[in-house]
Image: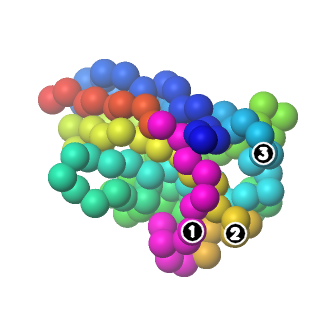
Amino acid sequence: QLMFVESGGGLVRTGGSLRLSCTANQFTVDRHAIAWFRQVPGKEREGVACISATDTSTEYADSVKDRFTISRDNVKNTVFLQMNSLKPNDTAVYHCAASPFRECVYPWASLPFDYWGRGTQVTVSS
C-alpha cells in the first residue's frame, strides 16, 4: 500500500526549476527521516536528499548539492524538494520514502526505508 503521494513533476528546460511535494497518509512525517530518491531505467536508484525528523539536519547527494533543497511542512504532513538549475541528467522518476530512523545517519541512502510513493516523473530537456 502506497504511503506517499508525490506531485510536482513535469517537463522543464535546462536551468529551470521544479518543486516536488510528497504528502504522507496514515502516518506523520515528523517521526521519520524522509528522503527523496530518483530512478532512471537501467540504472541504480540514487539517494538525492534526506531530512531528519527533527529538521536539524539535511543531507544531499554531491550531484545535487547547492541546487536542490529538501524541507518539510509538518502541519501539511508534506515534504518538499525544491530543484533549481536543473540539468538533463536530473531526468528521472522521483520517489519519497520514510525511514524508521529519525536521523539521516551516514550512509543515509542505505538506511531502511519502509514507506514509499509511486513517484513523479521529472524530465529536463536540453
Q: Residue at x 60, y 41 (%)?
A: 1
Q: Residue at x 72, y 36 (%)?
A: 25
Q: Would you call the spot at circle 1 few (<14 residues within 10 Å), some (14-19), or many (20 or more)?
A: few
Residue 90 against residue 9 in the figure, above or below: below
Which structural element holds mark 3?
loop
Q: Would you call the spot at circle 3 few (<14 residues within 10 Å), some (14-19), or many (20 or more)?
A: few
Q: Is residue 112 magenta?
A: yes
| Range covered by the magenta-colored residues | 106-118
In the image: residue 92, left or right of residue 71: left
> Mark 2: which amino acid?
Phe
Query: Which quadrant of the figure has residue 89?
Result: top left
Q: CA distance from mark 3 to mark 1?
A: 17 Å
Q: Which residue is mark 1?
A: 112
User: Which numbered tag is attached to residue 27?
Assistant: 3
In the image: residue 78, left or right of residue 112: right
In the image: residue 107, left or right of residue 115: left
> Mark 1: which amino acid?
Pro
